[in-house]
Structure formats: structure tokens, C-alpha cells
Image: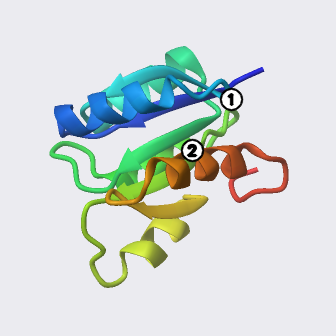
Amino acid sequence: MPIRVLLVDDEPMFLEALKALLEHDERIAVVGAANSGTEAIELARERHPDVALVDLAMPDLDGFQVTRELTSGDEVTRVLAVSGLSHEGDVEKALEAGASAFLLKGGLYDEVAEAIVAASEPGQAGT
């Protein structure tokens, strides 16, 4: 059964490129793509993803707020925090918010896919 993934980023081109790449991996099923924090939370409630890739810098709710929301409550979604730049403290802040891992957007596709698979395994942060 493929890992159900929600993509969250306010950059449409990055979102579409990542979605296109991940859809070719049989281990992964992209169940939604959101370009705002509010939309991400709504889609997560509707589609129940196993893992969400969440950009930290978004205009309405930032990725830290989205991470806290997705990793709390009865239905926990594991979050991989994603950022184009690593500001001091972002990694720690993302992990404290409940993220399982932190990835830079410049990472290779294989790194992203493997991080999704690792985050979905039992015993990872967020369980």
C-alpha cells in the first residue's frame, strides 16, 4: 500500500515539480497539494495523509503552525519540514513543533522520497 503524501508549499512551480516527480514512485501516492497553511490543514482532515511535506515559509499559517496542527490530535500526520533556506534555529524549531525531519529544497529527489519512506515507518517521531 503506498504512503499517502500531502505536499504543502506556496511556490506553485516547486509544488508541481515535486508532485510530478513523486507520482513516479510506486511507494508514494500524492493525495493532495496545498499552497497555504489553511488549505493544508483542510486537506489533511479530508484526505488523511500519512506524511506531509510542509514548507516552513508560507503567507497565512507558517509551516511551524501547520506542523503543530498536523502532529497533534487523534489522527497524526508525520511532517517533513522543508525550506529553501536554513535560518538559524529553524531545524530545532521544526523538530520541536513535531516534524520528523528537516529537508532543504535543494535536496535531490531520491533524498525526498527516502525521507518520506523513513518518516512513514513505525517508531519514527510523531507516532
Q: Nearer the viewer, residue 9 or 39?
A: 9
Determine whether, in the image, residue 105 is placed left or right of residue 52.
left
Rate crowding at label 2 as few (under 14), some (14 to 19) or many (20 or more) other CA atoms within 10 Å: some
Label 1 – label 2 distance at C-alpha: 9 Å
**Above or below for 45 versus 51:** above
For label 1, the residue is: 27
Q: Residue 13: horizontal and vertical position, in percent?
A: 19, 34
Determine whether, in the image, residue 65 is placed left or right of residue 30.
left
Determine whether, in the image, residue 51 is placed left or right of residue 67.
right
Query: How many numbered marks have been drawn onto this rendered protein structure?
Result: 2
Secondary structure found at label 1: loop
Residue at 56% across, 62% down: 101
Q: Are marks 1 and 2 in contact (CB under 8 Å)?
A: yes
Q: Residue 127: horizontal and vertical position, in percent?
A: 76, 50
Q: How is the image coloured?
A: rainbow
Q: Nearer the viewer, residue 9 or 38?
A: 9
Q: Amino acid at mark 2?
A: Ala
Q: Residue 112: horizontal and vertical position, in percent?
A: 51, 50
> Residue reaching furthest right?
122
**Above or below for 70 versus 47:** below
Q: Nearer the viewer, residue 23 or 46?
A: 23
Residue at 36% across, 25% down: 33
For label 2, the residue is: 113
